[in-house]
Structure formats: C-alpha cells, structure tokens
Image (tube, grey):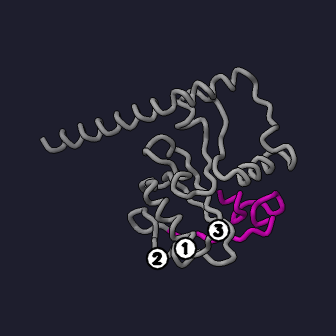
Amino acid sequence: LEEVIGIRGSANVGSLKDFGVTYREVPLVADGGLDWDALACSIRPETGCAFIQRSCGYSWRKSLSVADIHKAIGLIKMQNPNCMVMVDNCYGEFVEISEPAMVGADLIAGSLIKNPGGTIAPCGGYVAGKEHLVEAAAARLSAPGLGVEFGSTPGHVMRALFQGLFLGPQMVGEAVKVGLLTANGWRYNACT
C-alpha cells in the first residue's frame, strides 16, 4: 500500500498524498497485537478515516480477531465519533461467527478470490457497510453517477462468483478444521 498512500513511488499518479491525504501509522506491539495506548492517542479531531488490516498479510503476526477490531473501533469512535473506520477484511471472511461490519466498522473490503470465492472465483472484490460509503467507493471505482450500476462482468465469471459465494463458508470451515487437526497432530508427535 505504500504506493497507494504515496510514501513510495512516483508523484502525481493519483496516490492519497497526491490528493492531499495525510497518513499516520500506529505500530504494532512486539507480539503483533494492537498498541491500545498508542491507538487511543492517535485519533485526532481532524482524522477522517482509520484503516485496520485484519489479516497478517505478509508479516509474521497473528491476524486480528473480530473482538480486537471491536475494541479498536470503540477506542477510535471514543476519540472521534465522526472518524470513518474501514477494515481490510481479506482472509478474514467466514473465520469467526461475526464480521467487522457487525461490530461497528463503517466499511469493509476484501477479495472474492480468497475466502468468499470458495477457491472458484477467478477475480473480483467487494465492499460492504454503510450505504453512502459503499456508493462512494463504487463511484470512485467507476465514475460519479455510475456507482454500482456500472460494470462489465461476463456471465461465466458471474456464475463462478455465485458458486464461490455458495461454497466459501464450507471451504473456509474445512481449511480451519484441517489446520487445527494438523497443528494438534504436530503438537502430539512433538511430545511423544
């Protein structure tokens, strides 16, 4: 995301920095969790958006739980009730009973290729949350006035997307189950 933010790469290519958006990052603590004190102090009256990345991505840290995200949203909204909270929910879908939008996230986004695509979807992403924010995201993706009414997705891709959405929860559940069983087997074998 460094190019998107504008802290690396070329200038005047449409980064957030090019549009006058400033950026601050709250570093994680040594175990990869949120630094609650730093987060509580980081939100200011002029803060327009707080972005939370749920998954570990390419770093060696645990993914954030929905409970952690809920607590973070509470701290953010306590400091600035008007601050929009956006969660990158990639790899987090269907892993827990609840999702970030259910605990106060204003907008969530993710990839349909991963969990919700059930290993079938060949492309795509999603945004979900408050209607006016979804509309704003759609207008930014396409053009103002077109919003969610615009798109060219061939029928065979739509079929795969719907099949993926149908199978996604099952695929994620099976992956979690196999991961837990494998980890338990390794732990058992290491102790014997």
Q: Nearer the viewer, residue 109 or 100?
A: 100
Give the spatial CA distance, label 2 vs label 3. Answer: 18 Å
Q: Looking at the image, tell me whether mark 3 or mark 1 is earlier in sequence order.
A: 1
> For numbered disc 3, what is the local secondary structure?
loop
48 magenta-colored:
no
Q: Residue at x 52, y 72 (%)?
A: 39
Return the residue at label 1.
78
Q: Residue at x 46, y 64 (%)?
A: 71
Q: Nearer the viewer, residue 96 or 26?
A: 96
Nearer to us: label 1 or label 2: 1
Q: Residue at x 82, y 37 (%)?
A: 150
Return the residue at label 2.
37
> For numbered disc 2, what is the local secondary structure?
helix
Question: What residue span does the magenta drawing correspond to?
Answer: 1-27
Residue type beneath disc 2: Asp
Residue 170 place in picture, x, y as percent: 45, 30
Q: Looking at the image, tell me whether mark 1 or mark 2 is earlier in sequence order.
A: 2
Residue 131 horizontal side relative to residue 183, left or right = right
> For numbered disc 1, what is the local secondary structure?
helix
Residue 151 place in picture, x, y as percent: 80, 35
Residue 132 place in picture, x, y as percent: 73, 53
Quadrant housing the C terminus = top left
Quadrant housing the N terminus = bottom right
What kind of secondary structure does the magenta stretch mostly adopt?
A: loop
Residue type beneath disc 3: Cys
